[in-house]
Image (cartoon, helix red, strand yellow):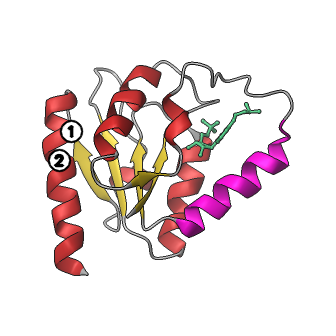
Amino acid sequence: MKIYFAGSIRGGREDREIYFSLIQELRKYGTVLTEHFGHESLTDQGDKDVTVEDIYNRDMDWVREADVIVAEVTVPSLGVGYEIGQAEAMKKPVAAFYRQIEGKSLSAMIAGNSYINLFKYSDLTDATQQFETFFKSLEVSE
Ligand code: 6IA
């Protein structure tokens, strides 16, 4: 199972530690192609030696290669929204994980899209259980 984990980069890195923990959990289910997205070294400035074209091409290759897309959508990110849209067009299973934060609400493009498996979670224990539910549902639909 190849998993593409998507999380905000230029949208804001405040949830980086959460991404890191989610990625560690996801590794129980397969290979996380985007394992470095939780790393401290990946800032919203990024690697100066890599062009944006390189990043786009590499990430889209990974989306094509992935069996499933898991996105953390709490911090709004243009890139994450784009990747979810592309994954849907490729008919890949998509799970979006969202933490309710007072005064904020999820984009209707995600919340209102019945193609996306939307999971609302509050902490890592919660997310861990929901990963299990999601990956089990994939086995059934295979
Ligand atoms: O719009 P955002 O930057 O928040 O989009 C985040 C999403 O786009 C992630 O799920 C990644 O798949 C992809 N992405 C955006 N930037 C990068 C990146 N370096 N490296 C890998 N994937 C990325 C950022 C460096 C850049 C600031 C020059």
Which element type, helix, strand or loop, lies under badge 1? Answer: helix
Circle 2 Cα neighbour tier, 10 Å, few/some/many (<14 / 14–19 / ≥20): some
Main SS, magenta residues: helix
Q: Position of residue 53 (x, y in %)?
A: 83, 49
Residue behind mark 1: 127
Q: Quadrant of the C terminus?
A: bottom left
Q: Residue at x 52, y 51 (%)?
A: 33
The number of numbered badges drawn on the structure is: 2
Seen from the viewer's position, the closer of residues 72 and 107 is 72
The residue where tag 2 is placed is 130
Q: Is residue 126 above or below residue 107?
A: above
Judge by depth and name the residue closer to the eye, 8 or 38: 38
Q: Which residues are magenta?
A: 50-65
Horizontal side of 128 relative to 33 (left or right) equals left
Q: Is residue 127 left or right of residue 11?
A: left
Give the amino acid type for the residue marked by disc 1 in the picture.
Answer: Ala
Task: Locate ligand 1 by image quadrant.
Answer: top right
- Dots 1 and 2: beta carbons under 8 Å? yes
- Single out the residue that lies furthest toward the bottom: 142
The residue at 66%/63% (across/down) is: 61
Image: 50 above or below 60: above
